[in-house]
Amino acid sequence: MFDTKTFGQRLSLLRKEKAVTQGEIAKLLDVTSTQISDMENVKTATTIARLYILCDYFNTSADYLLGRTDTPR
């Protein structure tokens, strides 16, 4: 089952490791900064298309972001 808490935590961690702002990720995904904050704070999730973009941007697997594995790549 999809764990939004893990997704939010890992999105935040990857974003901070890469030293990018929520605003920069928002522009990448064509959403608002509030939507990125909501993803990180487990208020909402994202679409498959945006998940794909995040995986490419952070060079990580969807399984890692979705909490199916603890191995980022």
Image: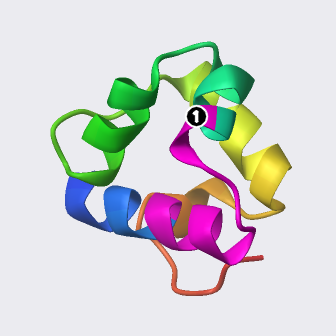
| Quadrant where the image shows the C terminus | bottom right
Q: How far across and down, in percent of the image, does residue 47 sit?
A: 48, 22
User: In this picture, is 15 found above or below 55?
Assistant: below
- Among all residues in the image, which is located at the extreme bottom? 70
* Residue at the spot 22% in from the left edge and 62% down from the top edge: 5
Q: Say if 19 sits above or below 66 in the image.
A: below
Q: Please give the count of numbered marks on the rendered protein.
A: 1
Left or right: 41 with respect to 40? left
Q: Quadrant of residue 63?
A: bottom right
Camera-side residue of 8 and 23: 23
Start and end of the magenta stretch?
Answer: 11-23
Which residue is identified by label 1? 23
Q: Main secondary structure of the magenta part?
A: helix
Q: Residues within 10 Å of mark 1 (few under 14, many from 20)?
A: some
Instruction: Find out whether residue 28 is within the magenta segment.
Output: no
Q: Position of residue 19 (x, y in %)?
A: 71, 67
Residue 3 appears in view: no
- Tell me the kind of residue under disc 1: Gly
Label 1 element class: helix
- Image quadrant where one finds the N terminus: bottom left
Asked if residue 14 lies in the magenta stretch, the reply is yes
* View extreme (left): residue: 43
Residue 61 horizontal/vertical position (percent): 70, 61
Residue drawn at x 61%, y 61% as measured from the top left: 15
Q: Is residue 50 left or right of residue 57?
A: left
Q: At x 73% / y 27%, what residue is drawn?
A: 28
